[in-house]
Image (cartoon, grey):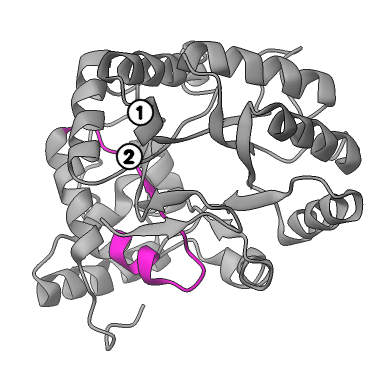
Amino acid sequence: MQQRTLGRTDIKVSSICLGGNVFGWTIDEATSFDVLDAFVAGGGNFIDTADVYAAWVQKVGISETILGKWMKARGNRHNIILATKCGSELAPDKKGLSKAYIFRAVEASLQRLQTDYIDLYQSHVDDPSVPMEETMEAFDTLVKQGKVRALGCSNFSGARLYQALETSAKHGWARYESIQPRYNLVDREIEADQLPICRAANVGVIPYYALAAGFLTGKYRKGQPLPTSARAANVNNRYMNDKGFAVIDKLDAAAQASGATMGQVAVAWSMAQPGITAPIASATSVAQVNELLGAASLTLDPSIKF
């Protein structure tokens, strides 16, 4: 699988990032191990998780815990580019991007992940209640301590990303080398907001929801019953509309023309967009991993327009 440089760092990541939100939520530990093994066997090295996964089912930190167990069992920590996040609410006193909380959160993540460093540590959500200087100084301290190799943000607007970059430059601190926004064939708002800033400043883009929570795989069809999955209600509310189904029609045609699956085309499209480092996609089985990996070698016909 092709590797790409993360922002201005020397960190090389696979062109697809495996999402860890499903570990311990929709798949158990054993299946998570199988999925991770298949991803690495197929040339992947970039894995994204967060401390909040899967708090929505009262399992705070379970994804990090499973990932830590897997890396220890396989003895492969040095081969993995590990990304995790902090800032989302875990409890009333465990949230945000204050200096004190960032220092608490990173220690908890390091313990669950059974490692002494994180390759990419990301602020999961913006926290306007904390001065940008406080947040960026705290992250810079973690880099200087060697606990973190690079910094990133998630769900930041273009304006807030720019402010963070300016703050780091002013003080000579480590900066955000990547941003993790929602981006796929349906959700394309970043093309007018964050992407121009990222391209100009050489900030990596690691979009989540590359498959729109499964909508772009083709298993959601107009007039058909919803699949029985944990994400079905969210997909129904966000994507099952005229805009979404228009994309599905084009994606279906592109898949048939390419001899690939709809999911592969959706991921390959994201990978091919200027400025994109590695789209994030989750998998709940080895078969899904193998399908995902197939997108890495798929070259789309340039005449296909979405």
Q: Quadrant of residue 201?
A: bottom right
Residue drawn at (67%, 73%) of the image: 200
Numbered tag placed on residue 282 in the rendering: 2
Q: Position of residue 147 (x, y in %)?
A: 63, 26
Identity, as a three-letter code, of the amino acid under mark 2: Ser
Q: Which residues are magenta?
A: 267-285
Q: Position of residue 213 (x, y in %)?
A: 37, 45
Residue drawn at (49%, 61%) of the image: 187
State the separation of the CA atoms marked 1 and 2: 7 Å
Identity, as a three-letter code, of the amino acid under mark 1: Val
| Foreground pick, 192 / 276 | 276
Single out the residue that lies furthest toward the bottom.
Answer: 303
Q: Position of residue 119 (x, y in %)?
A: 53, 36
Numbered tag placed on residue 22 in the rendering: 1
| Foreground pick, 234 / 178 | 178
Numbered tag placed on residue 228 in the rendering: none
Query: In screen coordinates, is 284 left or right of 128?
Result: left
Give the structural element (helix, strand or loop) at label 2: loop
Membership of 271 in magenta stretch: yes
Q: Is residue 90 visible from the viewing direction of this image?
A: no
Membership of 107 in magenta stretch: no
Q: Are the residues at dot 1 and dot 2 in contact (C-beta closer than 8 Å)?
A: yes
Q: Position of residue 291 (x, y in %)?
A: 16, 50
Label 2: few (<14), some or many (≥20) within 10 Å?
many
